[in-house]
Image (cartoon, rainbow, N blue to C red):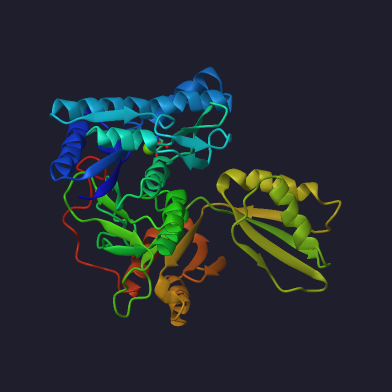
Amino acid sequence: MSLIVMKFGGSSVGTTERMQRVARRIADYHEAGHQVAVVVSAMGDTTDDLIDQSKQLNPNPPAREMDMLLTTGEQISVALLSMAIHQIGHKAMSLTGWQAGFRTDAVHGKARITDIAPERIFKAFEQGYTVIVAGFQGMTDDGEITTLGRGGSDTTAVALAAAINADVCEIYTDVDGVYSTDPRVVKCARKLNEISYDEMLELANLGAAVLHPRAVEYAKHNNVRLVVRSSFTQNEGTSVKEEAVMEQGVAVRGIAYDKDVARISILGVEDVPGVLATVFGALAAGEVNVDIIVQSGVLNGKADFSFTVSLSDKDKAISVVEGIRGEVSFDEVTSEEDLVKVSIVGAGMVSNPGVAAKMFEVISGLGISIKLVSTSEIRVSCVIAADRIHDVVRALHTAYGLDVEEQAFIGGPKDRR
Ligand code: ASP
Ligand code: MG
């Protein structure tokens, strides 16, 4: 007997029929003798719909009330799923996040889990119940309801798996697992059998939406065995763990790209000590998240800086920089949109110096110029013009030996095509 946490995303429980399919899947595990705790997201687009509705009444709703509203989405899912399980002759008990013992800090809209007291879950297990826990929610010590941020149900599942010491946490979604790149763009993308926490974390942070970055972080920290798999097939999925096997001679595990980038350049900055600290201190104080930072060489005592921010922060970043003209002397601020950050990720890179060079070769071979570069031990990212990103991803995928024959089935019947 294993203790298993199964998490189902919104599309997996998006309709009555899908809900029934999920109930069957849970019952199968139960019949096989496993103890099961389930975490579910709100059905389909429920969360988005609730947000739209709230904005019609108040474009800036109080964060507390927003949490009150959004947590209802998951409550609908758990109750309905529990009913579907009862209908096929099994005992299930739905629990809100707070009933399941999830305590969080008081940051509405992006709360962090501070503690989980799973006594009630264990009691339900003893009584022969499968528990169905509402994802993405918890309660503060003062009894206020909170949510964990968009996509937070993954984190609920991983945290629950850690708290009850589950053997595995299975994340069911509308794709077969984690792919080497977006299978909608590259037909011969490969499904990965394994990936390390660190690689997954890089990919998740780069926008591979299959897993929420915070959930991966939590899994790494607590050594939770994670499996990403499809709720529409019986295929094995991708195992996310500490050390993942790398195929002989392959240095890159995956390729990701993110269109949410804007470049800001500050030109002709007077090169005196402390300039960088002033500029980036002001940006941090303005809550602008800066990603890549590059400083060009100094000419006649003046330097140019470029950095990237997400599109939604572009205007704010410019006004923050304009606002410190009194403290820092510079000529002008420029900005650029329609960019993309394309990244290669792989643990094998550390010991393979040619990997980055190959990336630059492939991109320039397509006649595309690289505007900014950043690297970590297991990642190289290039910022380029967005228009030919699909060509670039395909070429990189081939160059790093990742292509496989076109796969027959990559996702749920309605979700991906
Ligand atoms: N329902 C929430 C959302 O759509 C949480 C989740 O799905 O993980 O963001
Ligand atoms: Mg969702």
Where residue 408 appears, as percent x and y from the top left, is 16, 56
Q: The C terminus lies in which quarter of the figure?
A: top left
Tell me, yes or no, if residue 206 can be seen here.
no
Q: Farthest top residue?
A: 57
Ligand 2 shows up in the quarter that is: top left
At x 43% / y 28%, what residue is drawn? 71
Q: Is residue 23 above or below residue 412?
A: above
Q: Which image quadrant for residue 17?
A: top left
Q: Farthest right residue?
A: 326
Camera-nearest residue between 112 and 89: 89
Where residue 375 appears, as percent x and y from the top left, is 53, 69
Where residue 156 appears, as percent x and y from the top left, is 41, 41
Left or right of 310, for residue 345: left
Camera-nearest residue between 200 and 305: 200
Tally of numbered tags? 0
Q: Is residue 220 above or below residue 96?
A: below
Left or right of 299, for residue 412: left
Where residue 110 appears, as percent x and y from the top left, is 53, 38
Q: Is residue 252 above or below residue 118?
A: below
Tell me, yes or no, if residue 114 can be seen here.
yes
At x 38% / y 50%, what residue is drawn? 211
